[in-house]
Every structure is written in structure tokens, then in C-alpha cells.
Image (cartoon, rainbow, N blue to C red):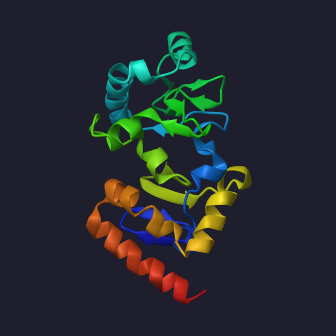
Amino acid sequence: MFRIGDTILSDEIATAKFACDVTRCKGACCVVGESGAPVSRKEIPVIRKAFDTLKNEIREEAHEAVSEFGLIQGNEKNGFEITCVDNRECIFVDYTGKNEAVCVIQRAYNQNRFSWEKPISCHLYPVRLKKIAGMEYANFEYIPDLCSAGCEKGINDGTYLSDFLKGAFVRRYGQEWFEDFKSECKRLRIGQ
């Protein structure tokens, strides 16, 4: 474990190699699991705006799930998460012709049709954040069914997880934090 500012990070975030390979995993992180993407209270209004703005791109099953369970589930104590369809697919999932799950928010952002990329928990995945006693803990959540293709691609491409997630880390913590983080990652790799 190492610390940057008020965040404690697992060493694997610095040393693991990873780069998403959606052509192989088919966007499994958006469709596999027992709960929706964790979101902060401050993200909820923009998620509501995304749902309203992109409602014509959201599948009928997702509209039905939102009608039944609401857009966001949870509470302040246990945390909030985006509703899923049948406890699997995020309501913001759409599918390409290659049967790859894509986020409609991310797609709209990439096409300059929406000004927000996606929840930070999605942007940082496979790193998960947890707050404990005023400190934030970041851990590489390796799930073989979801992450093995990304790990293989990272190894083949020589891409470290920390570099792959640069944009997400800068978005979450800022450029200065990322520069300190990058230096510490390099130091940890030397010790391998």
C-alpha cells in the first residue's frame, strides 16, 4: 500500500498491467455483477440529467427498471448505485452491432452531445474506491471473468493500469496529485 494525499492505494495499481479490450470482454463490467455502479450524492443530479437527455437511446428494459425501482438505489449510509436491469446490466447500457456493451453517457460525451463523461466509479474501473475514517482507499478489483482480457492486453501492449487510468485519476484527484502518484508508481516498479 502507498499513500498520495488522503488516498491509500494498493501496490497493484502501480505494478499491474492493464488496458481494456472491449472486443474480447464485450463490456462485461457494465453487465456483470450483483449491483449497479457506485455513485456519489453529487453525481446524482447529472445522472438524472443524462437519463432525461438520452432517454431515446436507453433501452425499453431500462425504462421499465427505472419505473419500477427508480434511477438510483441506496442511501447516504450504505451508498448509492445506478439501477440495473434484472440485477445485471446498467440502465445506461446499449449494444453495438458486435454485441459489445457501451455506455450511452460515454458515447454521447465522445460525440460532444453531453458534457459529462460517466460516473467516476465507471471511469476508474477496475479500481474501486472506498471511504473509511476520512481516508479514501483505492484497490485494483481483479475479477478474472471481467479483467483477464484487459490484463493480457496490458501485458502485450506494455501498458500499466496506472497509465491506462490517467484520465480518470486526473479527473478524480487533479494533475498535481497524478504527478505525485506517477512518481510513486515508478518507484514501486523499480522495487519489483
| Residue beneath the point at 32% across and 54% down | 171
In the rendered image, the quadrant that contains the N terminus is bottom right
Residue 88 at what x, y percent from top left?
65, 30
Q: Is residue 16 visible?
A: no
- Toward the viewer: 57 or 133? 57
73 sits to left or right of 49: right
Q: Which image quarter holds the C terminus?
A: bottom right
Q: Quadrant of residue 7?
A: bottom left
Q: Residue at x 62, y 73 (%)?
A: 155
Question: Residue 150: which quarter of the image?
Answer: bottom right
Give the residue at x 56% y 72%. Answer: 157
Q: Is residue 174 visible?
A: yes
Q: What residue is shown at x 52% (from left), y 82% (from top)?
A: 188
Q: Nearer the viewer, residue 178 or 54?
A: 54
Horizontal and vertical percent position of residue 158: 55, 76
Residue 19 position, x and y percent, is 54, 62
Residue 58 against residue 181 in the figure, above or below: above
Of residue 112 and residue 73, the one placed in the foreground of this image is: 112
Q: Tell me residue 122's x, y (percent).
A: 48, 45
